[in-house]
Amino acid sequence: MPWRLVWRNLLAHPLRTCLTIASVAVAVFLLCVLRAVVVGLTETVEKAATNRLWVQSAVSLFVNLPLSYQTKIQAVDGVERVVRWQWFGGVYRDPSNFFAQFGVDPEHLLPCYPEMTITDGSYEAFAKNRTGCVIGKDLATQFGWEVGSKVPLQGTIFPKLDGSSWDFTVEAIYAVSTPSLDQKTLFFQFDYLRETLEQGVCGGPPGAGVYLLQTAPGAEPTRIMAEVDTLFENGPQRVQATTEAEFQRQFISMLGNIPGLLSMIGSAVMFAIFFAVLNTMLLAGRERTRDAGVMKALGFGNGTMLALLLAESVVVCGLGGLIGVGAALAMEPPLQRAVAGQIPGLAFSKPVLALGFGLALGVGVLAGLMPGWRLSRLRPVTALRGDA
């Protein structure tokens, strides 16, 4: 089998070969990114904790719940802890510096999230300091913050009436081991917000945005959710209790059917690149017509013609696939930092990379079959005349 002809043919038109390889590489890179986003969104739901429930207003997530609900929910059989969460929505220097900020109950937050690990500082210091905060390690990296750093936030939902900023001190930095929680969030003490509101120092809605429930071992989440819903069915604010998986799914559904849309885009990208490679290989097949006639006259069989053009197509797509996969791995850290707040589970896992490379090889096989089959069917005389 004259395999050297494969490389000779590829190098005969270096610009065309390089452009085709680059096209496949870009397509594989985009496919890996799109697939990683879909997998990341899915894992956020699939890896949600089964012992955490969320209680929100039945009207809207943007409607606060009364603070009196906390003790009533805590009294429900099977509820181990209740944590108040309040979206703060502050601005750090510029609105483009967006990141999540929540007021929480520090004594219950960490026990509810065993996957949260303090990597620097002291969580106890955060719990003791009224104006302290704990931040994710990605947020610390983004702004260069460390333990002791001052974080001024300009209130939007809760603006201070004198126009001053809310000043927090970083007491601890956390990391998480699962995508159930991102690493670009700032947590501060809910009571600091509540007291500031009650003292008339700032404006904003009273109450808590949502309540996080940690269920006791062996407790039935379905029963607890039903009891909590029933407990407030006559108001003053009706609630809806959901599992953490369903709560995460609601946020994803706000953006529409993103996984389906991204899958469609990925399919369209591969469909387009298939025809680009097919066009290249058809052109290459026509250029090999006389060569095929000479080789057949020398005694090479039909299978050799098919194998050579097929190998040429697979080599081109394989190289493009390797470059695309390499680019995806190289871009993984910056992409993770860029979308950590929205897709904490984004990662180019082995199945994602294997899918991208496998599809590239598949495109190479399919694109090489048609021109290769054409060459294999030509008679030597017809090929030498160049009539085909």
Image (cartoon, grey):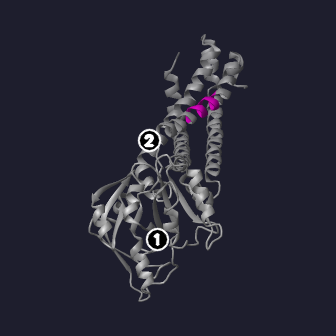
Q: Amino acid at mark 2?
A: Gly
Work out whether residue 105 or residue 31 is closer to the camera in this orientation and state it.
105
Q: Is residue 361 magenta?
A: yes
Could you tell which of marks 1 and 2 lies nearer the N-terminus? 1
- Which residue is pictured at 60% across the width and 34% down the height? 363
Q: Position of residue 84 (x, y in %)?
A: 47, 67
Work out whether residue 19 or residue 77 is closer to the camera in this orientation and state it.
77
Q: Is residue 349 above or below residue 69?
A: above
Residue 360 location, quadrant: top right
Q: Amino acid at mark 1?
A: Ser
Q: Position of residue 178 (x, y in %)?
A: 44, 49
Q: Within 10 Å of the Cα at label 2, are there few (<14), some (14-19), or many (20+) other Cα atoms?
A: some
Q: Is residue 249 magenta?
A: no
Work out whether residue 345 or residue 339 is closer to the camera in this orientation and state it.
345
- Which residue is pictured at 60% across the width and 64% down the height? 231
Residue 96 — which label? 1
Work out whether residue 290 or residue 234 is closer to the camera in this orientation and state it.
234
> What residue is shown with label 2?
326
The residue segment tinted magenta is 360-368
Q: Position of residue 198 (x, y in %)?
A: 44, 83
Assign the magenta stretch its main secondary structure.
helix
Which corner quadrant holds the C terminus?
top right
Visible residue check, residue 193: yes
Q: Is residue 339 left or right of residue 107?
A: right
- Foreground mark, 1 or 2, reads 1
